Each structure stands twice: as C-alpha cells, then as structure tokens.
Amino acid sequence: MALSAARVAISAARRSYIGSFLDEVLDRNRQPEWFDVQPIPMLDKEKAYRLVQMIPYMTDLSNWGQPEYFAKASETVQKGAADCDDKAILLASFWYGLRLNPVVVVADTDQGGHAFVEMDGYVYDATWDAYEVPLEEYYEKHGVTPSFWFTDRFYGGFD
C-alpha cells in the first residue's frame, strides 16, 4: 500500500501516536532496522513471548524522554523496559529469527492507543498478557480499531 494511502487510513487522533514512526522509519524504508535482535537458539515461540512479557512496562516519556518513541528491538533489550509498541517490535524480532511471520499492529482501543502482534488469526500481546487469543475475541474484548500494521518488509493502513 502506498504511504499516502496508509496515512489517509489513519485517524487524526492516531496520527500523533504513530506519525513520528511513519516519518522517521517508513518514509525511508527502514523498517527492517527496527527488528534487529539476533535469534536466541534456546527460544521457541512461547519462550520468546514470556521473555518479552517479563520486561517491565515504562512509558516512552519516562524511558526515552519523548511522548512517543518506537524503539528498535536492541534498544528495548538495552533499556530493559518498554511500552507496548516496543514490546511488540521486540517480540516480532525474536519471531522473525524463528522464521515466523508476525505483524505488529498499532490500534485504538477502549483504553487508548496500543500495539500488539498478530499472526495466523491470533493476537499476542505481551503488555496485556494475551497469548494466542483469537483475533475476534481480542478485538471485541478491548474495543480494538486497528490503524496501522507493519512487518520487517511491508506496512499499510486499515480501511
């Protein structure tokens, strides 16, 4: 999907949440850099999720001194704390190393802006403790309206 079309699909309220990510990363086709953690041989899909889940939650303002910051996977490991989008990027990075095909989704929810991982019809959310929850069930429970998705190679908006 063209970047301009993806921007149209993003609500005005969400633009502040992901605008910096679009401008700094996707406009330069640099999304592979965000998934920069090397695979860990002893990790399988669930162990990688549990490892990311154990990382303490910290807002970007506290962690990075900015209202919103999409950290590279390696930056999250170095900081040892993360918000939802940083955890989703780190989890996806581990899973790419396992040759899986996760998608990071940025969405509005009934609790505000949020990011999580989708794969094969399931949601994996290391921030809200949701492992392999069916997509429809997760969306209904949290009032999810997806805004934007990205992988290590592709990105797009939701219509």
Image (cartoon, rainbow, N blue to C red):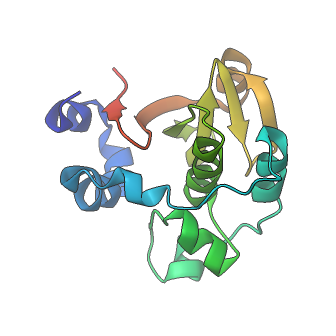
Displayed quadrant of residue 138 = top right
Percent x, y of residue 6: 25, 33
Where is residue 33 shown, x and y percent of the image? Answer: 40, 59
**Quadrant for the N terminus in the image:** top left
> Residue 86 lies in what quarter of the image?
bottom right
* Closer to us: 147 or 38: 38
For residue 129, side relative to residue 69 (left or right):
right
Q: Is residue 54 above or below residue 139?
A: below
Image point (44%, 39%), residue name:
151
Q: Quadrant of the C terminus?
A: top left
Whether residue 36 is visible to the viewer of this picture, yes or no, is: yes
Question: What residue is drawn where x is 63% and y is 79%?
Answer: 78
Left or right of 72 on screen, residue 159? left
Residue 53: % across, % down: 79, 55
**Can residue 17 be seen from the camera position used here?**
no
Q: What residue is at 65 percent from the left and 55 percent from the top?
A: 39
Where is 135 relative to 50, above or below? above
Report x, y in % for residue 57. 72, 66
Residue 83 in the image: above or below residue 31: below
User: How many numbered circles does the render carry?
Assistant: 0
Q: Is residue 100 above or below residue 136?
A: below
- Closer to us: 104 or 145: 104
Q: Name the foreground residue: 129 vs 36.
A: 36
